[in-house]
Structure formats: C-alpha cells, structure tokens
C-alpha cells in the first residue's frame, strides 16, 4: 500500500479488496455491537467484486446487516447489468447469505414512477450508513450521477434520499440510461466511504477530478468536496 496525495495505491486488486474488507468488516461489527444492526450501501461494477467476495467470507452476524444499492439500472433482477443480481452473486454468498438486501427496482414503468416504492424500502435501513462503497467511471461519474444528466441537479442538491436520473447515452452508460440513485445528501453523512478505482484511465480521471472544474462535468467532485476524508483506493 502506497499513500499519495488523496489516493491510496495498492499493488494489486486483491490487496485492495482485502484491506477494504478489513475496514468495512470492522465498521459493520462496531455498529452491530453498539446498536444491534448495521447498514451498508453497495455499488455495482467490476471493481468491487473482489471486495464483496472477500467480505462474504467474514464471520459477522450478517442477519443484522442491511445492504442498500447505491444505484440501479431500470431493469429487472436477472437481466444483464442488474446491480441487485450482481450483489446477490458476489456478496450474498457464504457467511453473508443472511444479509438483508434492499433493491431499488420495481415494475413501475420508469425510475421516477418507482421512487415512492424504493423510498419506502429504504426507510427500513439504518441510516446514516455505516459504510458506503462507491466506484467511478472514466467520465467522472459516481453512483448514477452522470455528467449533465437529466436529474443530476436533484442528485447533487436536493434533500431527498433517492432520485431518478436519465443519462446521456455513451460508452460508459451503455444502453441503460434510466437509473435510480442515492443522492449526495444521503451518501455524504455516511460514517465511512470508500471510492474504489482501477486502471490507469480511471486514475487519470481521478487526478482530473481533483483539479478546479465544473461538478456537472465530473460529478464525482461533489463527494470529494463534501467528504475529503473518504478513502480513495486504486489498483492497476
């Protein structure tokens, strides 16, 4: 592990996953000991897969842990790209099979029409979250806060917990541009936040995000400004 300005670099993705697993396990265990339950907001994407698999083997009272999706494509569980399915296949295994997972998708036609149902489910999760895992795209998005997306202003400035986003289609978004996402308001108060990035392209994007510039152009800047104490971790 190497400390740089604002960035913690690891020699490998496996080393990064194990270190974060140690830290998140400790956060969740402390919450269970102090309050009897713990909450955990989780992101999709390939980068955190190793972290979730490592956590799934940790001995915790997982029945007392509630995981909430940071964001979701507006597709049913089981469809390609579903974050809910990804979490079930990586984290909700082994010791963590008893984890309580709060999905965001419903059969409403659009994310905006599904907000009320998702917000009702979210009320059952202990907040502020004890731990949050975020990712970042090469375009500077995190959660589903995509540059210049319809709904981005709500995501970054409203007092709500969730909002609907309609992104501009790109190689990063793929075809699923309609999303539901936790807002900055909901994430920024979390007890521990990790931003996981991998590869040189995302490392360069992170360096750019630290420069002066528009939050709308690189929305990850919003959480970096609000929570300078978050753990930004990188592996090749």
Image (cartoon, grey):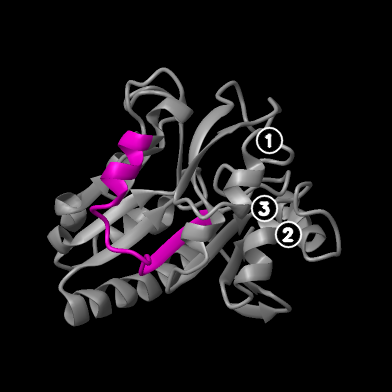
Relative height, residue 81 to residue 70 (above, below): above
Q: Which residue is mark 3?
A: 199
Is residue 59 found left or right of 163 in the rendered image? left
Structural distance between the alpha carbons of marks 1 and 2: 19 Å
Tell me the tag on residue 149: 1
Is residue 102 found left or right of 18 in the rendered image? left
Structural distance between the alpha carbons of marks 2 and 3: 11 Å
Residue 121: in magenta span: yes
Which quadrant: the C terminus? bottom right
Give neighbour class at mark 1: few <14, some 14-19, many 20+ (Cα, 10 Å).
many
Q: Residue 57, percent across and down?
A: 24, 61
Q: Secondary structure at mark 3?
A: loop
Relative height, residue 194 to residue 141 (above, below): below
Nearest-to-viewer mark from 1 and 2? 1
Q: Which residue is mark 2?
A: 206
Whichever of callouts 2 and 3 sits on the residue coming sooner in the sequence is 3
Q: Which residues are magenta?
A: 116-134
- In depth, the one of 132 and 121 nearer the eye is 121
Residue drawn at point x = 65 percent, y = 31 percent: 167
Residue drawn at point x = 55 percent, y = 57 percent: 184
- In depth, the one of 202 and 208 nearer the eye is 208
């Amino acid at each position: 592990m190497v400390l740089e300005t604002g960035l913690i670099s690891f020699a490998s993705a496996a080393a990064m996953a194990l270190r974060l697993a140690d830290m998140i396990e400790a956060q969740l265990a402390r919450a269970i000991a102090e309050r009897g339950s713990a909450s955990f907001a989780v992101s999709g994407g390939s980068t955190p897969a190793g972290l979730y698999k490592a956590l799934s083997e940790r001995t915790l009272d997982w029945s007392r842990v509630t995981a909430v999706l940071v964001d979701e494509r507006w597709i049913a569980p089981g469809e390609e790209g579903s974050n809910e399915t990804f979490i079930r296949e990586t984290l909700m295994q082994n010791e963590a099979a008893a984890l309580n997972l709060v999905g965001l998708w419903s059969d409403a036609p659009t994310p905006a029409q599904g907000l009320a149902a998702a917000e009702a489910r979210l009320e059952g999760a202990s907040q502020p979250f004890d731990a949050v895992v975020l990712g970042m795209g090469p375009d500077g998005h995190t959660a589903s806060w995509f540059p210049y997306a319809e709904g981005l202003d709500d995501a970054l400035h409203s007092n709500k917990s969730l909002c609907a986003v309609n992104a501009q289609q790109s190689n990063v978004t793929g075809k699923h541009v309609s999303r539901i996402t936790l807002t900055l308001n909901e994430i920024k108060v979390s007890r521990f936040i990790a931003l996981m990035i991998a590869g040189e392209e995302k490392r360069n994007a992170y360096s750019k995000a630290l420069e002066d510039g528009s939050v709308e152009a690189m929305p990850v800047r919003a959480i970096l400004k609000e929570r300078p104490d978050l753990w930004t971790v990188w592996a090749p």
